[in-house]
Amino acid sequence: MLREFILMDWRLLLINYGQSLHISEKITNIAWQTNLQKQYSNLIENMKYLLVSDIHGSLPALEKVIDFYHQQHCDMMCIMGDILNYGPRNGLPEGLNPKAIAERLNAMADEIVAVRGNCDSEVDQMLLDFPILQDYVLLVDNGRKLLLTHGHIFHKDHLPHGRFDAVVYGHTHFWELQRTEETVICNTGSVTFPKGGNPPTLGTYEDGRIRMFRLDGKLLKEIDL
């Protein structure tokens, strides 16, 4: 809705500006209009991605994630696995409700990219209207490559072949954001079962910058790719 308003506002601005000029003035102001168009096009085309992992069936955690998603004006939600199943090693999460989680996420299925976690299965896929069973997804944004995966196969100690500007995963439930010799490592932690005394965490990616946040919105760290 915001981008549609900006696009409409830009078009009206050009129309109103053009109507107030004589023909000769319009010709001399083509460069100004072209520059304005480029500036608004860049604003419209920039995508903001939410990076989140290890929801593990907690509906209250997902509700906070969706609130954060809208507050941050994100365009896509990237889920690094372990969506519906809480996992036998974790215990029961607060507000366990896989069916309700599936309903909430299916309502925004065209805005979601997801990968398979070690707790995800074909049964989970039957409840969800977006693919979750691939081991990784390559996100390419303005020439930058981000490898999205869960973390039980590929992680900072076992990187896949190739060059990536960032490798984003979860699985360990410990958040991390650091630059290595090979790439930028981003572990989003868990919004449901954070470990090591950490709060629930998630991240965003926009225009070459990864930010890590607490689920309550406090910024923890950021890195430019």
Image (cartoon, rainbow, N blue to C red):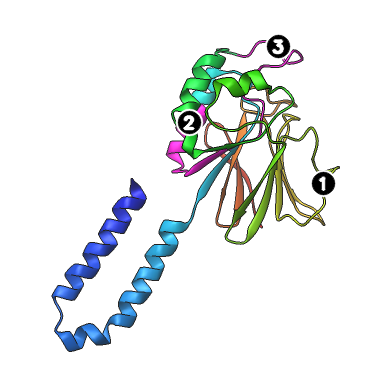
Q: Which residue is mark 2?
A: 66
Q: Is residue 66 magenta?
A: yes
Which residue shows up at 63% across the image and 31% down it?
A: 132
Q: Which residue is mark 3?
A: 91
The magenta stretch spans which residues?
64-93
For residue 95, above or below residue 196: above
Mark 1 or mark 3: name the one nearer the start of the chain: 3
> The N terminus appears in which quarter of the rendering?
top left
x and y percentages locating residue 213 in the rendered image: 59, 39
Q: Nearer the viewer, mark 1 or mark 3?
A: 1
Q: Residue reaching furthest top?
A: 92
User: Magenta: predominant secondary structure element?
Assistant: loop
Q: Secondary structure at mark 3?
A: loop
Dot 1 alpha-carbon crowd within 10 angstroms: few under 14, some 14 to 19, many 20 or more: some
Dot 2 alpha-carbon crowd within 10 angstroms: few under 14, some 14 to 19, many 20 or more: some
x and y percentages locating residue 38 in the rendered image: 40, 70
